[in-house]
Image: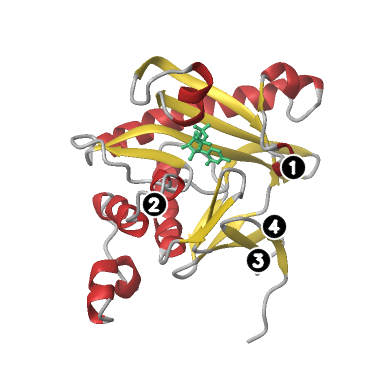
Amino acid sequence: MSRRRQIYEGKAKILYEGPEPGTIIQYFKDDATAFNAQKKGTISGKGVLNNRISEHLFTMLATIGIPTHFIRRLNMREQLVRQVEIVPIEVVVRNVVAGSLAKRFGMEEGTVLPRTILEYYYKDDALGDPLITEEHIAAFGWATQEEMHDIADMAIRVNDFMAGLFAGVGIRLVDFKLEFGRLFDGDFSRIILADEISPDGCRLWDMKSNEKLDKDRFRRDLGGEAEAYQEVARRLGLTPEDEPEVLNLAEHRKTRGR
Ligand code: UDP
């Protein structure tokens, strides 16, 4: 099979040239990294689940008018997306204290925030993605004021929608990371939601038990990563469909005698 040209390989995804100009194929790997890639591993079936979960969330977000790069899912591990110029900023939205916020201010994880906090990190692995302010973004020209206005506005809308969606299936949306891109139309460009939204970049806690259903299971050596991701997919109503052997991990293991 003639392989497509690889454009980029990241920690959890590979990007290939798409079939038409202006399109890209995102391939979701099972590789997992944490702590700026100091911790590495694989979560069997993660790529399939993230591809499906991200497809679902981007499709739902499009229905409330959030412009996204998502076009369609191609198969178990691949989706077709619009090619964008990624804004070099990771946007973190927080509803509940956890992770680096808890550490930075010595706060207890699980404290509900009185208002949603938006944070920006400069996307640079060598620097360990440092926390930045809008002053840095403006001074160094990483995004314009207009772009930052659109980004903040969309991040809040995405949070409102997703917090409700997850609450409806008994999951607390603690925090998550978004990435945005510039979609060019001649000289003009507009900001659209890009990358992925999956348990790799969200903190999702079961509302009753506070059980973690996200990448913290990997970061903190809690085990059961794939089962947690599968539980998120199951609660979102994402049935095994055409790939029962991987989405239905428990059955898969049983039939393989593991
Ligand atoms: N996050 C991410 N990629 C990163 C850093 C953070 O997807 O490079 C997500 C992370 O999964 C969490 C949220 O952003 O849902 C906030 O992460 P935090 O700043 O607490 O950092 P962490 O504790 O994960 O290092």
Residue linked to disc 4: 22
The nearer-to-camera label among 3 and 1 is 1
Tell me the kind of residue under disc 4.
Gly
Label 2, residues with CA under 10 Å away: few <14, some 14-19, many ≥20: some
Whether residue 69 is situated above or below residue 124 in the rendered picture:
below
Residue 126's mark? Answer: 1
**Mark 2 sits on what residue?**
56
Residue at 43% x, 47% y: name it.
Answer: 215
Regarding mark 1 in the picture, which secondary structure is present there? helix
Quarter placement of the N terminus: bottom right
- Sooner in the amino-acid sequence: mark 4 or mark 2: 4
Q: Residue at x 27, y 74 (%)?
A: 253
User: Reading the chain from its start, which is encountered first: label 2 or label 3?
Assistant: 3
Which mark is in front, 4 or 1?
A: 1
The residue labelled by disc 3 is: 18
From the image, state whether disc 2 or disc 1 is nearer to you.
Answer: 1
Q: Nearer the viewer, residue 72 or 52?
A: 52
Q: Secondary structure at mark 3?
A: loop
